Amino acid sequence: MDYGAILRASDDQHPRKRKRGNSASPAPTAALPGTPEKTEILVQRRRDGEQLWHLDDARLILVIEGLRVFIRPRFLRLPNGQDIVIGHEIVTDDTAVSSDQ
């Protein structure tokens, strides 16, 4: 993960002038940790002054003999366009192996 890109996302790098995080959490993401997609989401959250992580973001839960296992949210899109988390699925790298919880 390119943490430097996240830190550089703010136009003003001075710590006292940097935007404080929003009190509202960002929307959760199914992007897996360490992927370019997740890095871009973190950069955008930083630009928007949001908290970097959401409790329902996809996350690494364990590594067994080099196999990385993640848990990530499953979404339902409502008629108004809002996505809500309806469950979670267990995946290895990018392949789903089981779903629901």
Image (spheres, grey):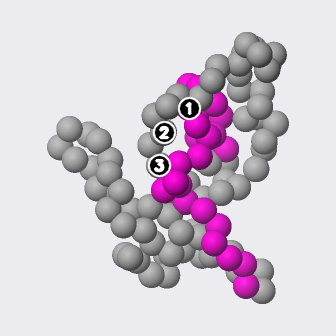
Q: Residue at x 38, y 76 (%)?
A: 101
Instruction: Please tell me whether mark 3 sits on a helix, a strand or a loop.
Output: loop
Q: Which residue is mark 3?
A: 28
Q: Residue at x 77, y 27 (%)?
A: 8
Residue type marked 3: Pro
**Image coords of residue 98 (percent x, y):** 45, 81
| Quadrant of the image occupied by residue 64 | bottom right
Image height of 43 relative to 60, above or below = above
Q: Which residue is mark 2?
A: 26
| Residue 84 among those drawn in magenta | no
Q: Are marks 2 and 3 in contact (CB under 8 Å)?
A: yes
Left or right: residue 87 versus residue 70 is left
Image height of 66 relative to 12, above or below = below
| Residue 101 visible | yes
Distance between the Cα atoms at labels 1 and 3?
12 Å
Q: Residue at x 29, y 42 (%)?
A: 82
| Residue 44 visible | no
Instruction: Please tell me whether mark 1 sits on a helix, a strand or a loop.
Output: loop
Distance between the Cα atoms at labels 2 and 3?
6 Å
| Quadrant of the image occupied by residue 5 | top right
Residue range of the region highlighted in magenta in the rendering: 39-64
Answer few, some or many: residues within 10 Å of disc 1's Cα (few below 14, many 20 plus, some between 14 and 19).
many
Q: Which residue is mark 1?
A: 50
Q: Are marks 2 and 1 in contact (CB under 8 Å)?
A: yes
Distance between the Cα atoms at labels 2 and 1?
6 Å
Instruction: Please tell me whether mark 2 sits on a helix, a strand or a loop.
Output: loop
